[in-house]
Amino acid sequence: MFNRSKKGRLIAIANQKGGVGKTTTAINLSTAMASVDKKVLLIDLDPQGNATTGLGIDVKNRNPGVYELFCESTAFKKVVRDTIIPGLSIIPSTQDLSAIELELVNMTDRAKRLLQYKDKLIYGYDYIFIDCPPSLGLLTVNALTAANSVLVPLQCEFFALEGLTQLLKTVDRVKGGFNKNLIMEGIVLTMYDRRNKLSSEVENDVRKHFGKGVFETKIPRNVRLSEAPSHGLPAILYDLQAPGSQAYIELVKEILGKR
């Protein structure tokens, strides 16, 4: 059923702070990876469902989705949707997901609901990106438990490092309790404005602390990245030449170059 000679890679895109470009990164990184002939799956674990919206999945076509996969053990193939991007599929988020943590809390395997599907993921796709919610609850723990690595979008703002510290503590706890092989994929600086002194100061601080753990590619503050979701399109399809789109293409090159 699966190609056992080839394993895909699960990358959780996580940051407990909202508004850092996490979902924008998930959408455009997935699209850029599919554009270089990789078979890609995006799992939308955010109850807000912004990644699902950003890839043009109509509200009427979102059930069954992540909720049914986690709580009702719905067959994996029934929750996967094709997108308009060749090679890119998605498991959509629905409104039901907003209450899922209350249902998971009494399950003995509550941190491993996604892990049980790992074989289907790593042998069915080259890359699986998980768009985590802006919190460090059970959904994020599920993503970290199943993932090979964590990619952290980090907004170039004053409190960036403070929020990152909290996330890294959670990663360490998951490594200690559920997933000893979990590693950092890297930190990507988002909303970077070269005209703003604060952006360069944050960059210097982050690179000082994490060195090569920070991607060379920086995602600029770019209006086209903000406009694209309202059209149900990744920025790469909305405006390929926009600086933000080009930055995500460069980020994919970095990720592939590390393999």
Image (spheres, helix red, strand yellow):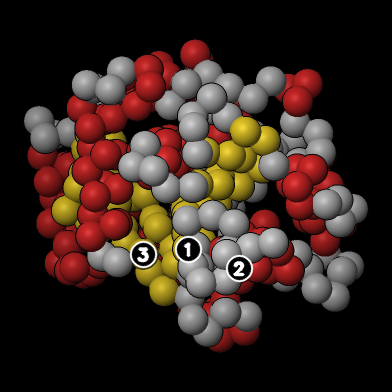
Q: Nearer the viewer, mark 1 or mark 2?
A: 1
Residue reaching furthest to the top? 231
Q: CA distance from mark 3 to mark 1?
A: 11 Å
* Kind of element beneath mark 1: strand
Q: Quadrant of the N terminus?
A: bottom right
Q: Neighbour class for label 3 at 10 Å: few (<14), some, many (≥20)?
A: some
Task: Tell me which label, 1 or 2, sits earlier in the chain.
Answer: 1
Judged left or right of residue 74, residue 141 is: left
Which residue is denoted by mark 3 in the rendering?
Answer: 185
Q: Given contact means CB atoms under 8 Å apart, are the residues at marks 3 and 1 in contact? A: no
Give amino acid for label 2.
Answer: Ala
Q: Type of residue at label 3?
A: Glu
**Real-space Cα distance between discs 1 and 2?**
10 Å
Q: Is residue 237 above or below residue 115?
A: above
Closer to the chain start, of discs 3 and 1, is 1
Q: Could you tell me if residue 170 is visible in this image?
A: no
Residue 89, can we see it? yes
**Residue 211 occupies quadrant:** bottom left
Residue drawn 22% across the image and 43% down it:
250
What is the x, y in percent for residue 93? Answer: 69, 38
Q: Which mark is residue 220?
A: none
Residue denoted by label 2: 146
In the displayed structure image, the side of residue 151 where residue 140 appears, left or right? right
Seen in the picture, residue 229 relative to 78 is either above or below; the reply is: above
Judged left or right of residue 91, residue 186 is left
Q: Is residue 258 above or below residue 132?
A: below
How crowded is the residue under tag 1: few (<14 C-alpha within 10 Å), some, or many (20+)?
Answer: some
Label ID, residue 9 = 1
For badge 1, the amino acid type reads Arg
